[in-house]
Amino acid sequence: MARKATGERKKQIIETTRDLIFSRGFSNFTVRTVAGLVGISEAAVYRHFASKEDLLRALLDSLFVPWRKSFGQIASGDNSVVERLLALAARHIEFLLEKKLNPILFFSEAISPENPSLLKVLQTNLLFFNQLLQSLFKEGAVKDEFAADLDVESAAVCFIGIVQASAIRWTIFKSDKLLKEDTIATVQFFLNHIVKLPEK
């Protein structure tokens, strides 16, 4: 059987790692198991990734790089801030489901002293999300979509809490039934009743 090109093999290893963690959890994730599922030696995996942490970081990047790009495109749209916030919530859940990669599964690994770069990846992307949301809430306040005295920092934290709660539910119950719909409905409730859109 012909050997796969380097890029193709790396992608296969990353996707196999993702599927393994998604279906069996971190407790069953080892480089040896990934190698066996791919049909290569453990040493072959390490030719593509310097360490287990390096492999996990590449896996997270496979989610967060397109996630950030997509979020940036949505945030820079010319529709209302409320519409963009709802679109961000929907896209976040879509990414989790499409990629079969739930960042919450990585938190226990990321806080381990052996995996400092994983924690850095999660921190960097959470900060990106928070700053993006604060910018949108500020824009909404300026455009009178929200109250002028809106606490944008608290609003951003609440928004992140809603989408993270959805991911936690997905993790615990192993079901994505109505996950996107419920998340959007909760964000809409937040925008209508917590943020309190001004009366016209």
Image: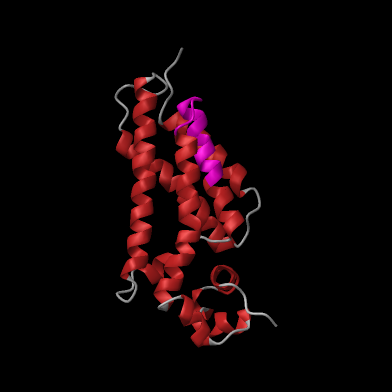
Residue 165 visible, this orientation: no
Q: Residue at x 34, y 29 (%)?
A: 138
The residue positioned farthest toward the right in the image shown:
1
Q: Residue at x 42, y 32 (%)?
A: 194
Q: Is residue 176 magenta?
A: no
95 shown above or below 112: above
Q: Is residue 85 magenta?
A: yes
Question: Residue 76: x percent and y percent?
Answer: 45, 32
Residue 41 visible, this orientation: yes
Looking at the rendering, the stretch of residues picked out in magenta corresponds to 76-91
Query: Residue 193 sits in which quadrant?
Result: top left
- The residue nearer to you, when weighing 137 against 168, is 137
Question: Residue 48: x percent and y percent?
Answer: 48, 76
- The residue nearer to you, when weighing 161 against 107, is 107
90 shown above or below 57: above
Apparent side of residue 56 relative to residue 38 in the rendered image (left or right): left
Quarter of the figure with the N terminus? bottom right
